[in-house]
Image (cartoon, rainbow, N blue to C red):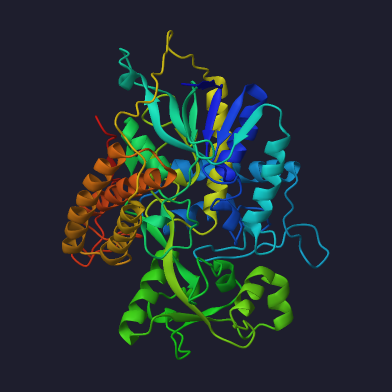
Amino acid sequence: MRIEECDFFVVGSGIAGLMSALYLAPHGRVMLVTKKKLDDCNTNRAQGGIACVMAEGDSFEQHVADTLTAGAGLCDEGVVRRIVSEGPERIADLERLGVCFNPRDDGMPGYDLGREGGHSQRRILHAGDITGQRVESVLVDQVHKHPNIRTLEYTMVIDLVTTRWLGHAGENRCVGAYVLDQNAGEIYAVRSPHTVLATGGCGKVYLYTCNPDIATGDGVALAWRAGADIANMEFIQFHPTCLYHPQAKRFLISEAVRGEGAELVDADGRPFMKDYDPRGALAPRDVVARAIDSEMKRTGAPYCCLDIRHKSREYLQERFPNIFEACRSFGIDMATDLIPIVPSAHYCCGGIKATVDGMTSLPGLYAVGEAACTRLHGANRLASNSLLEALVCAYEAAGRMVNDPQTLPDPLRIPDWQYGTAVASDEAVMVAHNWMEIRTCMWDYVGIVRTDKRLDRALRRIRNLRREIRDYYFDYLVTPDTLELRNLALAAELIVRSAARRKESRGLHYTLDHPATRRTARDTVLPGRGR
């Protein structure tokens, strides 16, 4: 079996993975793998922007306070302060690489800053309404140019390799991974003293999501199987405003639309958010998503609407060109029509338990971006804090690895991949059926509003499915579909187990059986397998 060597092994190609690679490249050989194309990631679909204190009248203290309020008592204030205060320096790094944010349109120096739900000030840096796409394209170009970065597309990690699994005595640590080259059908190993998981979230665990198809919880599943701790997986953020149209697959209506004055109304045009929260349409996402869910159940309508008809067509086309054109392609004129919307799974506030500098409970393994749980977001992420976290943590994690060099145990032989008696599968329908059953189960029982009975039912069904998938995994040759299904099922179980442990309602976790919030906030930590 072929074994590849590198100093830093980065998995994932969103802003967290690409920036990690760029920060690490001056210090050694970087191998970056991604299971699809480099730009097939959540970052590429981020419309709103990056939250950062950049204007007079705003302050780090205000940004910290807004983040802590949204996080419903579960943020680590030290983490919040560190990430918020470091934001401007990391934005400067992006600009040096070639990212351009919208300037003020009045000729004065500064940025055209947007405002989104939960923010007390305008502090959202944006590049039109396709900020993520603009950032991703610049970073992909920079990564391609760097001689120390080797990028491999259509390459998927099967499992991490640890010293305990290899039979080495002493402290368990990550030393690399088995990977699948999807184009060649070849399985080989990567050996590295530093492995960075920047694999994004797990939105595809749910039937309705605005995430791309790649968001199958791979990093969380890989880390847990290797022995790393997982934290706060019950906090799944449902974006309140995903376009409701039979042909509109996963299209978000950015929170920035509400930031510019759009009102949330029912299907008849009646505003309702002030009935739920004095902040109205700019309340945090957990509040808005539950309000929309409640209104849909109250009225029996399959959707609610956004109303921004008080803005001129010229303004909407200039401020939201991508959203305006997308809506128009579906027969919706933002200037004259209500925009039908529904909540959809959007962001996982939990993940691999990690520090700001990426360290996990498993030495040699780092996690950054949405795959990590740093406790910045607490029980509910403040809008546009995710790209900020990815930037800062990529920088800090790279610094930690460079300043704390590690060597692999010697000798370190990774055994050949064992195919056993596995054969090629002729039952693709099983993968498709189990995939749909997991997602339907999670949507019905572990959604915006939960109960103990629903969670218990979900756990039984998911565990049965995992047993079926485990048998299938060992009986047939490895394919990308079976790897994603295996990871998706595990991510689903970790979400359900975490939700069942939280006997309160806090932030994004709302349960009818325990509607009160406990006085003391505690994390939900699931130790990695074998610990």
Which is more toward the observer, 162 or 392?
162
Residue 158 spot, x, y in % from top left: 41, 35
Q: Residue at x 51, y 68 (%)?
A: 249
Q: Quadrant of the C terminus?
A: top left
Residue 143 spot, x, y in % from top left: 68, 37
285 sits left or right of 43 in the view:
left
How many badges with numbers are in the image? 0
State which quadrant residue 475 falls in. top left
110 shown above or below 405: below
Residue extending farthest to the right is 107
Q: Residue at x 16, y 63 (%)?
A: 453
291 shown above or below 181: below
State which quadrant residue 161 falls in. top left
82 sits left or right of 449 in the view:
right
Residue extending farthest to the bottom is 268
State which quadrant residue 326 falls in. bottom right
46 shown above or below 4: below
Q: Residue at x 70, y 83 (%)?
A: 312
Residue 258 spot, x, y in % from top left: 55, 73
Residue 362 spot, x, y in % from top left: 37, 27
232 sits left or right of 36 in the view:
left
Which is more toward the observer, 161 or 347?
161
Is residue 530 among the parts visible in the rendering?
A: yes
Is residue 71 among the parts visible in the rendering?
A: no
Q: Residue at x 48, y 20 (%)?
A: 193
